Structure formats: structure tokens, C-alpha cells
Amino acid sequence: MAKSTSHGQKSAPIRCPLDRSKLAELARAFHDDDPVWYEEAAAATAGFDGVPAPPTVGVLADHWREGGVHELIAIAGLDPERVLHGEISWEYMQPLRMGDELTATTALGEITTREGKRGGTMRLATVETDFVNQRGELALRRRDVLIEKGKA
């Protein structure tokens, strides 16, 4: 059952270290075996000043969060049995590299409604996660749109 939510409701901050093994696992999950994603020498040869994080590294925060992705659903107050992931986007403010320590905080954004094509009213919730690096700089903002299907 959905619960009442308010715009701006936030999760507890979580720490997300960008260590070598996690970056390698993420790159390999996308079938990218290029060692630039986890070997300092390969990254330097490719012209990087450190091992870069793969562009979708922000998804790893869900594995550090107690309850995982289900916490995003809870923050939005949606019924987990009717939720689909509709969209994700990343906005990078700082380069992310192996060895960075990120702190992620998730906040509820806008919730809108729309009539579903199969009946019932859908709710669309925007959830934003800000990642601050070890220097206190906003490094990454991730936006997810969660869709709660209407009751048909």
C-alpha cells in the first residue's frame, strides 16, 4: 500500500567508495573488458589522470543502501508491487575516479499522475540522488523516474 509522502523527503546519507573491484565488476557487467576501467597503467596510457569511473557508476549506490532499490520506492511512497523503473539520467559535475569516496543522499522530487492506457491512474515519481565527493563537491546527480501502474 502506498504511504503519504512529501516533496523533498530524504534518505539517510550513504557512503559509496569507488574501489577497483567494484569498477571492474561494473565494466564487466556491461561486457567491457577494457582495463582502463580498473588498471592505473592502462588508464594513464589512454590519457586519463586516474582510473575513470564508468558513466553509470551511480547505480552502485543502490547496493550500499539498506533495502537497496526498494528504499527509492519507499521514499516515493509507491506500492512496490505496481512499480516500474521508467527512466534514469546522470548529470556529472566532477570527474569520478577510482579511490573517490562518495556520499549519496536521495530526495523525493515531483510526483505527477497520468491516466494509464490500460486503465487506472499512474503515478510518476522523480527521485534525485546527489553524490558528494570526499572534497565536499557535488560530483554527480542521478535522476530516476519511478512509475506506479494504475489499478486496472
Image (cartoon, helix red, strand yellow):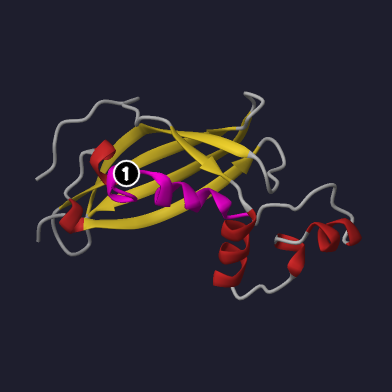
Is residue 67 part of the magenta span, yes or no? yes
Q: Quadrant of the C terminus?
A: bottom left
**At which x and y percent is residue 9?**
31, 26
Visible in this render: residue 124? no
| Label 1 neighbour load within 10 Å: few <14, some 14-19, many 20+ | few
Q: Look at label 1 and name its amino acid.
A: Glu
Visible in this render: residue 142? yes
Q: Nearer the viewer, residue 113 or 40?
A: 40
Answer left or right for 24 relative to 127.
right
Residue 66 against residue 46 in the figure, above or below:
above
- Which portion, as a residue range, is magenta? 55-71
**At which x and y percent is residue 142?**
51, 42
Residue drawn at x 67%, y 35% as measured from the top left: 93
**At which x and y percent is residue 111?**
30, 36
Q: Nearer the viewer, residue 53 or 90?
A: 53
Residue 24 against residue 123 in the figure, above or below:
below
Q: Nearer the viewer, residue 132 or 111?
A: 132
- Label 1: state its secondary structure: loop
Residue 76 against residue 151 in the figure, above or below:
above
Residue drawn at x 68%, y 74% as measured from the top left: 33
Disc 1 target residue: 66
